[in-house]
Image: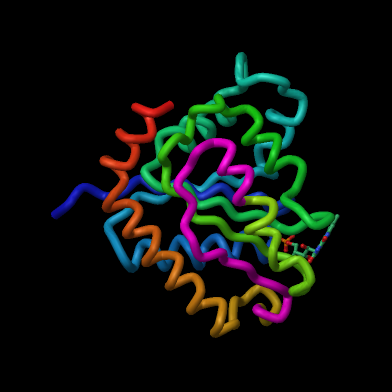
């Protein structure tokens, strides 16, 4: 049996009961059904008291330092955020501000967002993708975006969304397969 891929899912939810968390779980389930994985979930709201006042990663409390390590060492990162004011949440961005600029070079990253309506469906391509472009990560081409209409309460029901998740998972698999050579090239050029 092949070595499981280490996948870290960063969820920018701001509370425990959250559609963003449901979306992140659906992506995690789809990845686990497609390939051997070990999943680690980082919920940003749980780290708020630790990372909120932090201006650098130095001296972070253990839980937050472990979350940063899980992000830095994942084979595949899944970044999922609620849409706040047309973008990712401030705390979600703050967590990534604590990473070194070269922490994610050549890392496959699957991007997803969850908003109230379709009005900000381009948030993945216009906000999340440039952030991970800064990190020189390898973002999965298909954007996953969910809106309130994709849920019945806190159950994900959108068939189109499920198809989009499946497509993004397939692309993530392809990036994982080519990860080692791509990373070597990018690191050489960095
Ligand atoms: C402060 C705030 C700002 C928001 N801004 C937007 C927005 O700009 N566009 C949008 O589509 N939804 C916006 N929403 C709606 C949330 O994205 C939506 O309710 C989402 O499902 C929240 O995720 P959660 O269930 O994980 O908390 C906003 C919600 C809040 C609380």
Residue at the spot 41% in from the left edge and 50% down from the top edge? 39
Say which of 126 and 14 sits in front.
126
Q: Which quadrant, please, contains the C terminus?
A: top left
- Quarter of the image for residue 1 reads bottom left
- Quarter of the image for residue 186 reads top left
Tell me residue 85's x, y (percent). Answer: 84, 55
Q: Which residues are magenta?
A: 129-150
Residue at the spot 66% in from the left edge and 73% down from the top edge? 154
Tell me residue 59's x, y (percent). Answer: 61, 14
Does residue 137 belong to the magenta stretch? yes
Quadrant of ligand 1: it is: bottom right
Q: Evaluate whether residue 108 shows in this view.
A: yes
Tell me residue 44's x, y (percent). Answer: 65, 43
Say which of 147 and 176 sits in front.
176
Residue furthest top as drawn: 59
For residue 160, side relative to residue 114 (left or right): left
Residue at the spot 66% in from the left edge and 49% down from the top edge? 12
Tell me residue 185's x, y (percent). Answer: 32, 35
């Amino acid at each position: 049996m092949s070595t499981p891929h280490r996948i870290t899912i960063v969820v920018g939810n701001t509370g425990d009961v959250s559609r963003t968390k449901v979306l992140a779980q659906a992506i995690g389930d789809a990845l686990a059904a497609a390939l051997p994985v070990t999943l680690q979930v980082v919920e940003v709201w749980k780290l708020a008291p630790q990372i909120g006042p932090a201006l650098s990663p130095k001296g972070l409390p253990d839980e937050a330092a472990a979350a940063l390590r899980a992000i830095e060492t994942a084979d595949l990162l899944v970044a999922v955020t609620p849409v706040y004011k047309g973008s990712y949440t401030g705390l979600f961005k703050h967590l990534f501000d604590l990473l070194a600029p070269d922490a994610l070079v050549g890392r496959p990253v699957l991007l997803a967002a969850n908003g109230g309506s379709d009005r900000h469906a381009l948030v993945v391509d216009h906000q999340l993708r440039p952030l991970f472009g800064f990190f020189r990560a390898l973002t999965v081409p298909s954007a996953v975006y969910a809106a309130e209409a994709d849920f019945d309460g806190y159950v994900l029901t959108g068939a189109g969304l499920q198809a989009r998740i499946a497509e993004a998972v397939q692309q993530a698999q392809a990036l994982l397969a080519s990860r080692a050579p791509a990373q070597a090239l990018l690191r050489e050029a960095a």
